Amino acid sequence: MVSSGITTDDKPDHFTTPIALKACAGLRALKYGMMIHGFVRKNHGMNMFVGSALIDFYSKCGQMGEALRVFKEISGPDVVMWTSMVIGYEQNGYPEEAIAFFSQMVVECVNPDPVMLVSVVSACAQLLNFKLGSCVHANLFRRMPEKDVISCSSMVACSAHNGAAVEASDIFDEMIDRGIEPNSVTVVSALQAYAVTCNLDECKKIHEVAAWKGFQLDVSVATALIDLYMKCFMPDKAIDLFERMPRIDVVSWAALLSGYA
């Protein structure tokens, strides 16, 4: 439709425009998406649905300046638009802007949703802003309608992979306290966090959890444990676990040998 031109007799409306923008966002087709934006300006104008689609489109194309301009054109943006902006900034490598936007939203009394809060936690982890991250984390747990292993594991992994070891371990501990049983992904992420802090007491606890759940010899969990034990100067425990693994891959060997480097 866009590539062949838009006629005045058969032009898109507020319902078809967001669909076209979603397709452009998925394809990262910046040129065509901007053509649609130009058509919107010239013809039927902006509403919440079109505005949200434009913000999402520009965010996914890495054009946060354009996304912000669209956001400012909307009178009384809803939580979806705020969320799109925060996620856009965070995913495009602007954690400070993501947190600033989140703070502005709170000042304007817009209640954040869980999706936004996960992005804010990630932004805090990138900036190593543990104090704010802890506040957001607490807020997220309060607002989550269903706190399950998937949502909690995502938060643990998000913090651990961004170097926020204390935050990741706190989330894992709270997850256990709430009676949410971890899976192997959660355990690996938590172990990666504990390896940074070299917290042997927590390491023993999580090793017990892994053994209780029956996946301590899972190759990813065992490798994470070996890495942690080697970093914490406990090669005997690492070797014992290594020798009991039913399957060993190159990553397991690397984790063991790197401890002797």
Image (cartoon, helix red, strand yellow):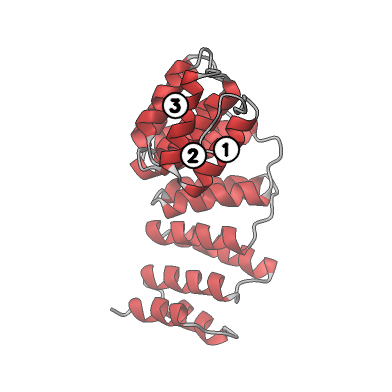
Q: In this view, does 144 lie to the left or right of 232?
A: right
Look at the numbered disc 1 and give the secondary structure of its residue: helix
Q: In which quarter of the image is the N terminus?
A: top right
Residue 70 visible from this viewpoint: yes
The residue drawn where x is 40% and y is 36% is 89
Q: Name the residue under label 3.
A: 38
Look at the numbered disc 3 and give the secondary structure of its residue: helix
Front label number (2 vs 1): 1
The residue drawn where x is 47% and y is 19% is 42
Q: In this view, does 37 lie to the left or right of 206?
A: left
The residue drawn where x is 46% and y is 48% is 159
**Relative vertical location of residue 136 with respect to residue 161 in this rendering, above or below:** above
> How far, Cα to Cα, is label 3 from label 1?
13 Å
Q: How crowded is mark 1: few (under 14 residues within 10 Å), some or many (20 or more)?
A: some
* Amino acid on which the number 1 mark rests in the picture: Ala
Q: Name the residue under label 1.
A: 20
Give the image location of residue 170, x and y in percent. Answer: 51, 46
* Amino acid on which the number 2 mark rests in the picture: Ser
Look at the numbered disc 2 and give the secondary structure of its residue: helix
- Residue 43 image label: none
- Specify which label sits upstream in the sequence, 2 or 3: 3
> How far, Cα to Cα, is label 2 from label 3?
30 Å
* Amino acid on which the number 3 mark rests in the picture: Gly
Q: Mark 2 points at which residue?
A: 119
